[in-house]
Amino acid sequence: MTNYLDLSIKEINNKLKNKEIKVIDLVLECFNRIEENKEYNAFITLNKDEALKVAKELENVEVDNLLFGIPIVIKDNIITKDLKTTCASKILSNFIPCYDATVIEKIKEKHMIIVGKANMDEFAMGSTNETSYYGPVLNSYDKTRVSGGSSGGSAVAVGRGIAPFALGSDTGGSIRQPSAFNNIVGLKPTYGRVSRYGLVAFASSLDQIGPMSRNVYENALLL
């Protein structure tokens, strides 16, 4: 079992540049960790086949930025083309979007790997991640406690070391609170700093998409 995902982003980047590892090594390790942490219920939809396909394609692409090939988890209220987006609701249990949110386009431009869509409070309305149609997300440190919401799945994915990065959304604390509950760094950007095109709205004038990460440097990098 490898532990490449425990390295810093700079260390992973150097290994990719020096061809010590391949992107597919990171992706396979990420999905192993997803399997090992299934009881936390952090994910609604996995993107394994597409993630492996993209990882394979990147073997012939030059490593040109620090985020290249890094696995990332996306909160399930952010629109992803051809990848189910449910907002943790039964109503959207079969909704497959035909376009990408702006943030997803930017992630793909950097050749990051989307590994799955994170569990959340239904339609982002909640602060404990207990209102999801797909069941609650359990806290990274104590499974008897809540993970915080509404971006609980994203926070737990980073908190458990499944992926170095996740995207969440914050209206009244939905990134900041679960980040605090799971001992990671989460940021609600200034309104307008990050496009919310493709974010399923809760309260349009307050919603923001923001980065969730292991430390402040990597949070700034993703922002």
Image (tube, rainbow, N blue to C red):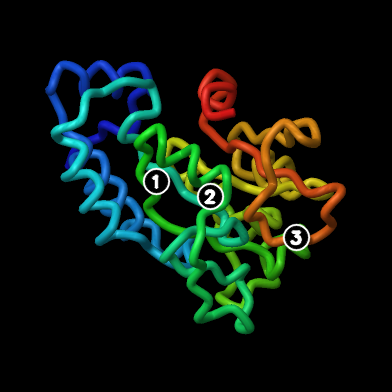
Of residues 99 and 209, the one nearer the viewer is 99
Residue 162, disc: 1
Q: Distance from label 3 to label 2 (Cα)? A: 23 Å
Residue at (64%, 72%) from the top-left corner?
A: 132
Picture coordinates of residue 140 (x, y %)? 53, 49
The kind of secondary structure element at disc 3 is loop
Which residue is most to the front? 98
Identified by mark 3, the residue type is Ala
Identified by mark 1, the residue type is Ile
Residue 8, disc: none
N-terminal of the pair, mark 2 or mark 1, is 2
N-terminal of the pair, mark 1 or mark 3, is 1
Using the image, determine if residue 213 lies above or below residue 170. above
Q: Indicate the quadrant where residue 75 lies.
A: bottom right
Picture coordinates of residue 86 (x, y %)? 57, 71
Q: Disc 2, disc 1: CB below 8 Å?
A: yes
The residue carrying mark 3 is 201
Using the image, determine if residue 70 lies above or below residue 53. above
Observer-side mark, 3 or 2, equals 3
Residue at (26%, 23%) from the top-left corner?
A: 63
Q: Is residue 36 visible?
A: yes
Q: Is residue 142 visible?
A: no
* Apparent side of residue 17 relative to residue 108 in the rendered image (left or right): left
N-terminal of the pair, mark 3 or mark 2, is 2
The residue carrying mark 2 is 156
Identified by mark 2, the residue type is Val
